[in-house]
Amino acid sequence: MVNGRRSQIEIITDILVISKEGAKKTDILYKGNFSYKQLQEYLLYMKDKDILEEIRVDGNGSRLYRPTEKGLIFLDDSKRLLEQLI
């Protein structure tokens, strides 16, 4: 974070960390300090890239998000990269 703002890699990494055990959208929103619009864009992007999956947990439409296998690999790689930059 050079200019005080998170990079795309940092944002994606944050979402993957927060959702590692499964998280609702509101949990990711508040724990990650995202705007609703920003979170929507990232969730869509990450699902499209197959690094995050959306799981329906019951009949009332409740959903959880968690990293896919590809997402867990990305998470490990991005943590290593970010550690080198800090």
Image (cartoon, rainbow, N blue to C red):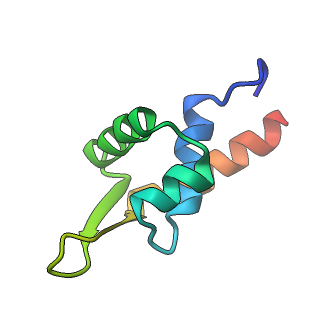
Q: Nearer the viewer, residue 75 or 42?
A: 42
- Residue visible at 68% across and 50% down? 79
Q: Is residue 8 above or below residue 12?
A: above
Q: Is residue 57 above or below residue 39?
A: below
Q: Nearer the viewer, residue 32 or 53?
A: 32
Observer able to see residue 73: no
Q: Nearer the viewer, residue 27 or 49?
A: 27
Observer able to see residue 69: yes
In terms of image quadrants, where is residue 63?
bottom left
- Report x, y in % for residue 38: 44, 33
- Please give left or right for residue 40 compared with residue 59 in the image: right
Q: Is residue 21 above or below residue 5?
A: below
In terms of image quadrants, where is residue 36?
top left
In terms of image quadrants, where is residue 45?
top left
- Please give left or right for residue 31 compared with residue 41 in the image: right
The residue at the far bottom in this view is: 58
Q: Quick one: quadrant of the N terminus? A: top right
Q: Quick one: quadrant of the C terminus? A: top right
- Residue visible at 62% across and 28% down? 7
- Report x, y in % for residue 35: 49, 36
- Residue visible at 29% across and 41% down? 44
- Report x, y in % for residue 49: 31, 43
- Report x, y in % for residue 52: 37, 56
